[in-house]
Amino acid sequence: MPERREKFYLTTPIYYTNGLPHIGHTYTTVVCDTVRRYKRMRGYEVVMTTGTDEHGVNVERAAKKAGIPESEFVANMAEAWRSLWDELGIPADEFVRTTDIEHVRAVQWLFKLCKENGYVYKGHYTGQYCIYDNAFVSDAKPGENCPDCGRPLETLTEENYFFKLSAFQKPLLDFYRKNPNFIQPESRRNEVVTFVEGGLKDLSITRTTIRWGIPVPGEEPHVFYVWFDALTAYLSAVGGPDYEKRGMWPADVHFVGKDIIRFHTVYWPAFLMAAMLPLPKQVWAHGWFLMDAAKMSKSKGNVVLPRPIANMLGMDALRYFMLREVVFGQDGNFSYDALVTRYNSDLANGLGNLASRTTALIEKNFAGKVPKPAERQPQDDVLAKEAQSAIGEVLERFDKMEFARALEAIWAVIAAADKYLTTEQPWALGASDAGQARKGTILWTTAELLRIVSALAHPVLPDSTARVWSLLGQTIPLGSVELDGLRWGQLVPGTPLGKSQTLFPRVDKTEAIERIEAMANEELNSASAAPKPASVPAVAATPAAAAAAPAVPDKIGIEDFVKVEMRVGQIKTAERIVGADKLLKLTVDIGTEIRQICAGIAQYYEPESLIGRKVAVVVNLAPRKLRGVESNGMVIAASVGPEGRPVLAGFLEDVEVGSRLK
Ligand code: ME8
C-alpha cells in the first residue's frame, strides 16, 4: 500500500470509428478495467483512458457512404463506443476523441516540439499505401496486397513532412536495454528489438491526399498522419501541453493488441524522445481472440458482439471467460460453447453455489446472522491456510498480469471450500449445543472464505462479487476495500446477512447460445440499417434477464396483428444440425418459394417423420442465424408443459400450400 496515493495511468488503444466494438476490443478494455480496479484496491489513484480514432480516409469514405458529414458520422460512432463501454460497466475515466479541440492542440504542439528540436523535414514520398491500415507498406511493389489485411495497396506520391525516425535507432535500442520491462510479453520484445536492429527509415507524418485530418498549422493542405495523431491522444487525455499539472504522464502501461505493437514501441517513444517528453513505462501487447482460427473482423463476417453475451449471462461471465480461458499475451479461441460451459461450471456451480449453500444454511440455522466460530478442528485450519495463502499468490499474479493464474488460484480455494462443506455436512449436524457450535464453525469458515474470495476476484467480477459481499452483510463498498489489509479472520460474528439472491442462474447451453445468436443478429441488422448509437438494445441489468419471456402487452390492435404474415407451408426436407441438439434445419415450401427455416424441435420429432407435413409458418420474420445456420421464417408450435415441449401446429383438413392464415 503506497504511503501517499501513488498515481497509475493506463490506456486502451484509441479505437477506429469505422466499425463498432466487438469482443476483441472488449477484451482490451476489460483487461484495462480489471487492472484499474485492482490498482485502486491497492491504494493507487488511477486513470484509465480509452477513446476513438476519428480521422483518416476510411472515415471519409464511410461518412460518404452513409451520406452524412464526417463530423456527424464520427460523433455518432464515438457515442456508440462510449455508451457501450458505459453499459458494459467498463467506462473510461477519460474518453478522448481525436476530433476534440484539446487533442488537436496537443498534436500540433507535439509536432512543433519535434520540429524545433530538428527532427522534422519536408520531402516527397512515393509508396504503396494501405488505406485500411492507414500505413505505407515499405518494400511493397505496385499491385501487391497489404501483408497485414490482404487488401489491395494503392500507389501514393505526396509532399510530406518527414520524421527522422532513423536518428532513433540507437536511442531506442538503449532504451529497451535499460528498461527490459518496457515491452511485454518477452517474445514481443525480441521481435521489436530485431526490427529496430534491422534499421529504421524516416517516416512521413503528414498527408496532402487526405482532407479529414488535423491540419498542420500554416501548412494547409497538410494534415497529420493518423498514427502521429492517434498516439498523441494518450497524452492529450491527461492534459496535453499541460500534462505536468495533472501529474498522470508518463503512462504506466499502454494495453494494445499485437497488431499495433510497432506503432507503440517504436514510433511513439521516438516521437516523445524527439519532443524531449517522458516515455511511457510499459507497452503490453496481448494476443488475438480468434473465431475458427481466424482473426475476428467485420470484413470476414465473423465478429462476436459483447452486448448479447452480457444480456444473456451477465458481463461478469464474459469477463471471467476472457481472462480465465486465455493466457494473457497469447492468442485464444472464442466459442459460445466454451463460454457457456465455463459459466455453468465455474460460476453457477462454483462461486454461485458456494455462496447460496453457505448463506442458506446460515439463514436456516443462525437466523441470518454470521455465526460465531467455536473450537477449531485441523480441517478448518487447512482451509483457512489455503485461503490466506491465496491472497499473496493472487496479488502476485495480478501484478504480473497473469489473470488466468490468479483466477485459477481463487477457484482452487472455492473448490476446496465446496469439498469441505460436502465432507463436514453441516446440514446433517443436530441442534444440540455441540451440533450448533460445530455448524457455526463450519459456516463461519466458508463465509469467511467467500468474503476473501469476493475481494480477490472483484477486479475481474465486479458485479457478482459485490453481490456476494453484500450477501455477507458487508457494508463498505467492495471496490474501496484495500487488498493489502485483507486477512483471514476479519469476518465479524453477528453480522446480519444481506438479502438472498441468485447470482448465476444455470442455463441450458443450446438455448442460451440460440438466444445470444438471435440477439446478435438483431443487433447487427439494426446497426447496419441505422448506424445510430441509440438503435440497439441496452444491456440487461442482471444475468439471464433476457431468458425471461419478453413482456406481452395486454391487448394489441388488429393493425399489429396484420403485420405478421402466416402461411401454410409444407416441409420438404429435415435434418439435424451438428452441435445443436435442439435444432432441425428444414426446407419448407410456402407456395411462392422454398425457405430454409431452423426449428427447435429436434428432441421431439424425428426428421424423417416431418417430410410432407403441413405446418403454420411466419414468413415475414427477418432472417437470422441460429448456430451459424440461416433461418428465414418460423414454424409455429405450441409450448407444452413446464419443459416447453414443442407440438407443431397443423390443420384438421387438407389445405393448399401457401394459403394465408388470418
Ligand atoms: O488499431 N482480439 O484501432 P482498432 C483481441 N485506431 N484484440 C482485438 C481484436 C481481436 N480479435 N480485434 C481488435 C487501431 N482488438 C488504432 C489504434 S492507438 C493510438 C490507435 C483490439 O479499432 C486490440 O487491442 O483497429 C487491437 O490492438 C485493437 O483492438 C485495434 O483496434
Image (cartoon, grey):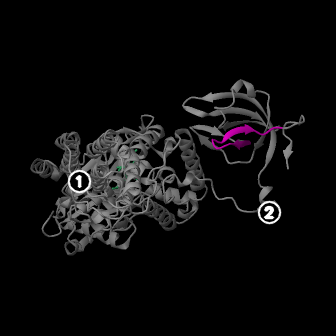
Q: Position of residue 17 (x, y in %)?
A: 45, 58
**Which residue is denoted by mark 1 in the rendering?**
374
| Residue 138 position by quadrant | top left
- Front position in the image: 337 or 520: 337
Q: Of circles 2 and 1, which is in front?
A: 1
Q: Does residue 543 lie above or below 417 as drawn?
A: below
Which range of residues does the magenta coloring cover? 636-650
Q: Where is residue 52 drawn, in percent x and y?
A: 40, 61
Q: Which residue is mark 2?
A: 557
Asked whether the viewer can see residue 389, the reply is: yes
Q: Residues within 10 Å of mark 2 (few under 14, many from 20)?
A: few
641 falls in the magenta region = yes
Query: Which part of the image, by quadrant, shows the N terminus?
Result: bottom left
Mark 1: C-beta under 8 Å from nearest atom of ligand 1: no
Inspect the image, locate mark 2, and give the three-letter code of the amino acid beneath it: Gly
Q: CA distance from mark 2 to mark 1?
A: 66 Å
Label 2: which secondary element: loop
**Is 451 part of what is drawn in magenta?**
no
Q: Which mark is residue 12?
A: none
Residue at 33% across, 58% down: 33
587 up-or-down from 271: above or below:
above
Between 565 and 189, the one lying in front of the other is: 565
Between discs 2 and 1, the one toward the N terminus: 1
